[in-house]
Image (cartoon, helix red, strand yellow):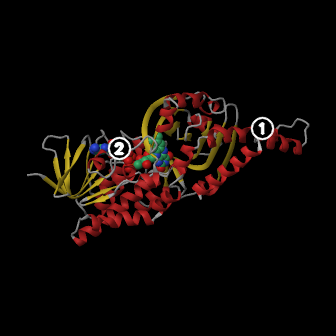
Amino acid sequence: MAETFDVIVVGAGPAGTSCAYTLAKAGVNVLLLERGEYPGSKNVMGGVLYRKMLEDIIPGFYKEAPVERHIVEQRFMMLDEQSAVTFSYKGLEWAEEPYNNFTVLRAKFDQWFADKAVEAGALLVNETVVTECLVENGKVVGVRTDRPDGDLFADVVVLADGVNSLLAKSLGFHKEFRPDEVALAVMEVLKLDRKIIEDRFSLEGDQGCTFEIFGDSTKGILGTAWLYTNKDSLNIGVGAMLSGLIKNKIRPHQLLDYVKTHPIIRPYIQGTEQQEYLAHLIPEGGYRSMPKVVGDGVIVVGDAAQLVNAIHREGSNMAMTSGVLAAEAILDAREAEDFSAAQLDAYRRKLLDGFVGQDLKKYKDATHHFEKYPHYFEKYIPLMNRAASQMFTVDGSSKWEKQKKIWNELGSAKEKWKMARDLMQAWRVMK
Ligand code: FAD
C-alpha cells in the first residue's frame, strides 16, 4: 500500500525544516525529504543567520545550536583598485544576549535544525530526490521520489526545494528564471587560527564581524563580495548577477581570485588555508519575480518562492518565516478539512502583509535599476574614493581648493545633473 502522510515537505533547508518543525510540534504527521546525504550537505550560505526568526520558532536556540560567532560589527566597503571608503556600525548591545545575528556554517547548522524537527516528531528521510509532484484532478496529492516504489501521498505538499525549484516550475508556477533574476555566488571557507581572527578583526571571545564589499570586487557588475568571521575560519565569497557575468564574460571564480589578491583585502586573509569551495545561485529577482506560491494541495516557501532581500542579504530569515506561515496555514486548513488553493491562500496573504512581503515590495525596483545602470558601481564608487583621497591628503592646499578639485572632477554641468538625477533615482527605488 502507498505511504500516506498529512504533509510532505520537500527540502530540509531553513524553509522546509521550519515548516516541518512547526507542524510536527502541533502533532501533524509530517515527512521531510532531503536529496543530500544529510541536511546542509548541499547548502551554501555566506553565513549570517538572523536571530529573531529562529528565536520565534525555538526560543534560546543559540545556547545549543552550532552557531559560530555573534556579530557585533557590520562593515561596508566601497572598493576601488587601490583604495576603499569604509563605513561600519559596531554595537556593543549586540555583544549581549540574546544577541542580534550569528555567523553559521550551514553544513552543521542545517543538520542540527533538522534534528530538532525530528525530535519534535517529523520523519526525516535523506538521500531522496523528489522528481515530480503527483497531481490528480488539478490537485497535488503527493510526490514521486527516485526510490523504488517511491510514490508518497499527503494532503499538502510543501515545496522548499530552493532557488531552482524544478517542482514549482513543472506545476507551471513559474517559467525558467532569467539571468537577471538570479545571482551566481562562489564562496570559500578559509581556515585560520581563532586568536589571529580575534586580533585581526578586533574581536573579543565569540564576537564576530561581517564585511560587505562593493564596487571593484565585482568589476562593476551588480553584486557584492563578503568576508565573514567564523570561530576558526573565514568565509570569503562573491556573488554577481548572472546576466552581468554573461555580458562581461567573467566567471565568478575570477572575481573571487581578484578579491582575494586585492591589496586592501589580502591582509585580512593572509595565512589562511582553503577548506571548502562552493558555488550556488541566489534568487535576486525580488517581488516582481515571485512565482505563484499556492495551489490546490501545495505551497511554495523560501528560495523556491524567490524570498530573498538582496539589498540586505536576507534570505534564511525569510525562508524560516515563510516555512512557519505555511505551517500555520496548513494547520488552519486541517481544521477546515479544506486543502484547496483558496483555503491555503491565507499563507500568501500573511506572507505579503508581514515583513517578507513588505521588504520585497520596498525594493521591488532596486535590483533591476542597479542592474540597468552599472555606473553606480563603475563610476560613482571610484569617484567617492578619489574624493576621500583628495580630502584626506594633507598637501598644503586649502580645504576650499580641495573641494573645488573634487567638484571639477564630477565633470561638466551636464554630467553633474546626470549624477544628481541618478542619486534621486537611487533614492526613489530604495525608499
Ligand atoms: P535551501 O537552503 O536552498 O534548501 C533547499 C533544500 O532542498 C536543500 O537542502 C536541497 O538539497 C533540497 N532539495 C532541493 N531539491 C530537492 C529535491 N528535488 N528533492 C529533495 N530535496 C531537494 N541568507 C542569509 O540570510 N544570510 C546570508 O548571509 C546569506 N548568504 C548567502 C550566501 C550564498 C553564497 C548563498 C548562495 C545564499 C546566501 N543566503 C544568505 C541565502 C540563503 O542561503 C537562502 O535564502 C536560504 O538558504 C533559503 O532557504 P531554503 O530552505 O528556501 O532553500
For mark 2, what is the residue?
Answer: 176
Q: Is residue 62 visible?
A: yes
Residue under the point 48% across and 57% down: 360
Residue flagged by tag 1: what amino acid is it? Answer: Ser
Location of residue 75 by image quarter: top right
Residue 189 position within the rendered picture, expressed as x and y whole percent measured from the top left: 49, 34
Distance from Cα at disc 2 to Cα at disc 1: 45 Å
Viewer-proximal residue among 188 and 135: 135
Viewer-proximal residue among 33 and 304: 304
Q: Is mark 1 within 8 Å of ligand 1?
A: no
| Label 1: how many Cα within 10 Å (few below 14, some 14–19, many 20+) | some
Ligand 1 sits in which quadrant? top left
Q: Is mark 2 within 8 Å of ligand 1?
A: no
Residue flagged by tag 2: what amino acid is it? Answer: Glu
- Above or below — where is 254 with respect to 366? above
- Badge 2 marks a residue whose secondary structure is loop
- Badge 1 marks a residue whose secondary structure is helix
Q: Is residue 188 visible?
A: no
Location of residue 268 by image quarter: top right
| Label 2: how many Cα within 10 Å (few below 14, some 14–19, many 20+) | few
Residue under the point 64% across and 37% down: 200
Residue 407 position within the rendered picture, expressed as x and y whole percent measured from the top left: 80, 44
Residue under the point 73% across and 45% down: 414
Residue 214 position within the rendered picture, expressed as x and y whole percent measured from the top left: 61, 41
In screen coordinates, is 414 left or right of 122? right
For mark 1, what is the residue?
Answer: 389
- Above or below — where is 7 with respect to 274? below
| Residue positioned most to the bottom | 336
Q: Are marks 2 and 1 in contact (CB under 8 Å)?
A: no
